């Protein structure tokens, strides 16, 4: 007899959507997420297009749906170790890392006040710091702190523990492994930005005021490290002239061969909120092709109708900096054929979208293409959703997740 429960690997927007769609049709669903929170990349955005909504707008609704549905269970700080069996009868081994904070946590923040050690914030892509006791963002779900026990010594850990008025910190917590028996699996493992360290030609890691598009999202976010102030990393000054470099690591045989789909829209979105905050700022977008598919053409038209925005069809060949740490771009204009140098205060690289599982060995030998996207597995009872399958925006991610949920249900019902 088939097991009608469904495992969703990944608790980002795709994973949450797939889980809820299945659960609201009466199926038991388990979400496994490696981060301390649900929400994935969407939670790290300042806004998403085309309505320029904050991420809390969509995610809070999803979190409320999870809270109200007993069919959905989730495990954060958890990863799938192995999968065995077949459609209708999978045995999945999962390992959960210790959070060191239990369900008595009220989110009061006394533990973070007691913590002194600061480390680079992964959530903020290195644009800010976090403490050894931390929560990643204001609307984090679950609303519970996490202790990074490796970031500080035992004396500080004890101080953090003693600061909690609710006895919610357990420093003796250990990693634990457990098994789930499920009938179908959805892989919604999301995406990661193409590594900046591989884009040295474009100044990444060498030029102080070159950042990625996701770093820009965190700088612009009201809950980010600068409280929403878009500033230069080198001196904290507000930039007056900003360049956006498209296809940074995409459509390039030395990096990612494909178009990452969202980058042009992401940059136009960022242009909109930069211009809203800094009306005098001058912006130049360097592009190969400016791609705004379907209904996004209207968004593009509204954005480019701006006298302070210039669109230049051309390839950025190199990025250096002057004595004041101003980035200097060497650009060849594809229309005029003229090659020149241009000075800016800040450069934003529209880095490509890479599947989070790229380079990893997946359970059951799931087939992936040369870039790491899952290209099959449905014959094995596994369905890919969202950016585990191909580059997508938030709207199409939700559509993909709904489709994946229905296929997962068909896998267990049809047996």
Image (cartoon, grey):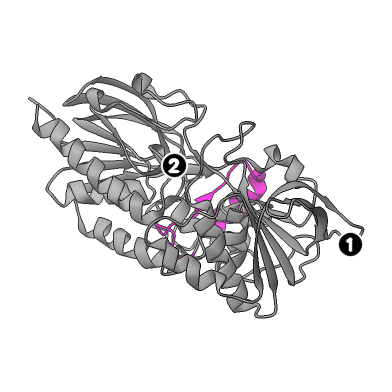
- Which quarter of the picture shows residue 133? bottom right
- Which quarter of the picture shows residue 251? top right
Residue 169, magenta (yes or no): no
Residue at horizontal 61 percent and vertical 75 percent from the top: 275
Q: Of the residues tagged 2 and 1, which is closer to the observer?
A: 1
Q: Quick one: SS at disc 2?
A: loop
Does residue 37 appear in the picture of this structure? no
Residue at horizontal 61 percent and vertical 71 percent from the top: 274
Image quadrant occupied by the N terminus: top left
How far apart in space, not on screen, are marks 2 and 1 (Cα)?
A: 42 Å
Residue at horizontal 58 percent and vertical 77 percent from the top: 276
| Residue 78 falls left or right of residue 192 | left
Residue corresponding to mark 1: 324
Position in image of residue 324 (x %, y %): 89, 62
Does residue 80 appear in the picture of this structure? yes
| Residue 4 falls left or right of residue 243 | left
Along the viewing direction, whichever of 296 and 68 lies nearer the viewer? 296
| Residue 14 falls left or right of residue 411 | right
Along the viewing direction, whichever of 126 and 388 lies nearer the viewer? 388
Neighbor class of circle 2 (other Cα within 10 Å; few <14, some 14-19, many 20+) is some
| Residue 148 falls left or right of residue 6 | right
Position in image of residue 129 (x %, y %): 66, 56
> Where 406 sits versus 287, above or below?
above
Along the viewing direction, whichever of 194 and 253 lies nearer the viewer? 253
> Where 90 sits versus 207, above or below?
above
Q: Quick one: SS at disc 1?
A: loop
Residue corresponding to mark 2: 77
Provide the residue span drawn in magenta.
138-162
Position in image of residue 130 (x %, y %): 62, 56
């Amino acid at each position: 007899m088939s097991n009608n429960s469904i495992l969703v690997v990944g608790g980002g927007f795709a994973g949450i959507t797939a889980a809820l769609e299945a659960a609201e049709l009466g199926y038991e669903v388990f979400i496994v997420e490696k981060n301390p929170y649900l929400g994935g990349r969407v939670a790290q955005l300042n806004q998403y297009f085309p309505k320029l909504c904050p991420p809390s707008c969509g995610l809070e609704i999803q979190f409320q749906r999870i809270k109200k549905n007993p069919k959905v269970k989730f495990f954060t700080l958890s990863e799938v170790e192995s999968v065995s069996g077949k459609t209708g009868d999978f045995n999945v081994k999962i390992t959960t890392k210790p959070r060191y904070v239990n369900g008595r946590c009220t989110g009061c923040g006394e533990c973070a006040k007691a913590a002194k050690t600061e480390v680079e914030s992964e959530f903020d892509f290195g644009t800010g710091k976090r403490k050894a006791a931390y929560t990643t963002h204001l609307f984090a779900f679950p609303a519970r702190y996490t202790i990074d026990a490796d970031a500080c010594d035992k004396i500080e850990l004890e101080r953090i523990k003693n600061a909690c008025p609710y006895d919610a910190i357990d420093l003796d917590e250990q990693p634990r492994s457990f098994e789930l028996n499920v009938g179908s699996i959805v892989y919604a493992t999301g995406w990661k930005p193409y590594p900046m360290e591989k884009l040295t030609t474009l100044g990444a890691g060498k030029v102080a005021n070159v950042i990625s598009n996701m770093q820009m999202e965190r700088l612009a976010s009201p809950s980010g490290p600068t409280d929403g102030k878009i500033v230069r990393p080198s001196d904290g000054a507000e930039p007056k002239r900003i360049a956006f470099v498209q296809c940074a690591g995409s459509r390039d045989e030395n990096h990612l061969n494909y178009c990452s789909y969202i980058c042009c829209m992401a940059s136009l979105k960022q242009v909109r909120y930069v211009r809203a905050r800094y009306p005098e700022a001058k912006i130049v977008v360097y592009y190969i092709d400016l791609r705004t598919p379907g209904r996004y053409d209207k968004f593009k038209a509204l954005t480019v109708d701006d006298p302070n925005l210039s669109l230049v069809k051309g390839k950025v060949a190199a990025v250096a900096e002057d004595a004041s740490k101003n980035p200097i771009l060497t650009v060849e204009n594809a229309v005029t054929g003229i090659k020149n140098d241009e000075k800016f205060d800040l450069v934003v690289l529209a880095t490509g979208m890479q599947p989070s599982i790229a380079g990893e060995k997946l359970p059951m030998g799931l087939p992936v293409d040369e870039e790491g996207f899952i290209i099959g597995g449905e014959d094995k009872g596994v369905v890919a959703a969202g950016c585990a399958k191909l580059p997508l925006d938030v709207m199409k991610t939700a559509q993909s997740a709904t489709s994946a949920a229905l296929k997962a249900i068909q896998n267990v019902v049809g047996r």
